[in-house]
Image (tube, rainbow, N blue to C red):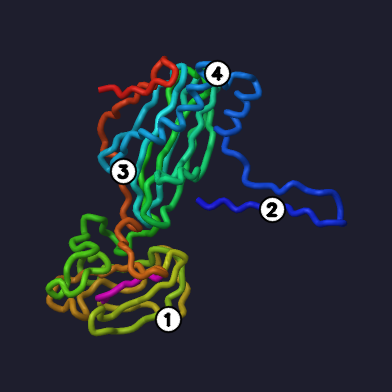
Amino acid sequence: MRVLFLLLLAVVGCGPDLTPLGPAPAPSVRYAESLREAGLDSTRLGRAWAEAEATALDTPVALDLPSGPALTAEAGAVAAAGWELDLRQGEVLAVEVAPALADSARAFVDLFAADSTRERLGGWEVSRDTLRIERRAERDEAVVLLVRAELLAEGTVSVAVRTDPSLAFPVAGVDQGAIRSRWGADRDGGARRHEGIDIFADRGTPVVAGLAGRVSRVQETPIGGRVVWLQTDLGSLYYAHLDRQLVEAGARVAVGDTLGEVGNTGNAATTPPHLHFGIYGRGGAVDPEPFVVGRRPAPRTARPLDLGAEAGGLRTRR
């Protein structure tokens, strides 16, 4: 999620000097500052709360989707835990944090880059309501999700993590189970690679716009057969092997509008009907599957993290 902010610049001779303003500090940063102002940062608990960030960033618990469960953190004297997740370009990270803390105590949520920069990508706080966070991955990246509660908070903080697609599935009436050929598969005896995914469906099944945009090309080629190109904010979406094209170049379409119908034209004449779907950005083709398929935790009992009553403690229940 990109945060835009305004810099106020002083103008010499046109009024008083103004201090440049930057993005507001994350709630966890403001809370740490309040501990310092109260003289609590030098206490055992205060030091442990401050050290929790470094500990979580250095030793996060790997969270593998879709096998990773929802998580429940039990608050103690110092409640903090970090989870690391690899995101693929086009996925939308979706996090729900539901605190059940006594006396409306707050939980703080921070998202960091897992690389050497440790850049803070966002920061939030929540006390009673469920906090929902979304972030679209603009490239393959690893992130660390850090959840902390106020000092001496009692109760639980439930954290559910999944990824959602950023595009509507391009073939109506089917889902990811219809994908039978994926990105990178060899073509022509290894002479080239498959720059897209193949989604199999009955001939004539509607092919739909994954995102609002403008139809940039409607043409027929030896390889793609009848194709439609859709220009969107996320790049050019490529729909190939269509049986029929149902839009014209220049048309504006909304999410879910029909662009054509599944077929096997072009070099797919000897295969069952399917849609070849591709995405092209400024750097060329990218794997479209993360854009259209989300990853959700398996429906099984969560393994809770016991955040311990000991300052700085972080233990995993087995």
Q: Residue at x 53, y 52 (%)?
A: 2
- Residue 14 lies left or right of residue 147; in this view the side is right
Q: CA distance from mark 1 to mark 4?
A: 59 Å
Q: CA distance from mark 4 to mark 2?
A: 38 Å
Q: Amino acid at mark 3?
A: Arg
- Residue 316 lies left or right of residue 24; in this view the side is left
- Residue 156 in the image, given as x and y percentages of width and height: 43, 23
Residue 296 against residue 242 in the figure, above or below:
above
| CB contact under 8 Å: marks 1 and 2 | no
Residue 241 sits inside the magenta stretch = yes
Circle number at residue 163: none
Q: Residues within 10 Å of mark 1 (few under 14, many from 20)?
A: some
Q: Which residue is mark 1?
A: 249
Q: Amino acid at mark 1?
A: Ala
* Dot 4 or dot 3, earlier in sequence: 4
Residue 186 sits inside the magenta stretch = no
Question: In this rendering, which labeled residue sits more in front, label 4 or label 2?
Answer: 2
Q: Residues within 10 Å of mark 2 (few under 14, many from 20)?
A: few
- Residue 170 in the image, given as x and y percentages of width and height: 32, 64
Q: Which residue is mark 3?
A: 296
Q: CA distance from mark 1 to mark 2?
A: 42 Å
Q: Which residues are magenta?
A: 236-242
Find numbered disc 2 in the image and state the secondary structure of the residue it sits on. loop
Looking at the figure, which quarter contains the C terminus? top left
Q: Residue at x 45, y 49 (%)?
A: 135
Q: Which residue is mark 2?
A: 7
Q: Name which quarter of the figure residue 293 lies in.
A: bottom left
* Dot 2 or dot 3, earlier in sequence: 2
Q: CA distance from mark 4 to mark 3?
A: 32 Å
Find numbered disc 1 in the image and state the secondary structure of the residue it sits on. loop
Q: Residue at x 21, y 81 (%)?
A: 266
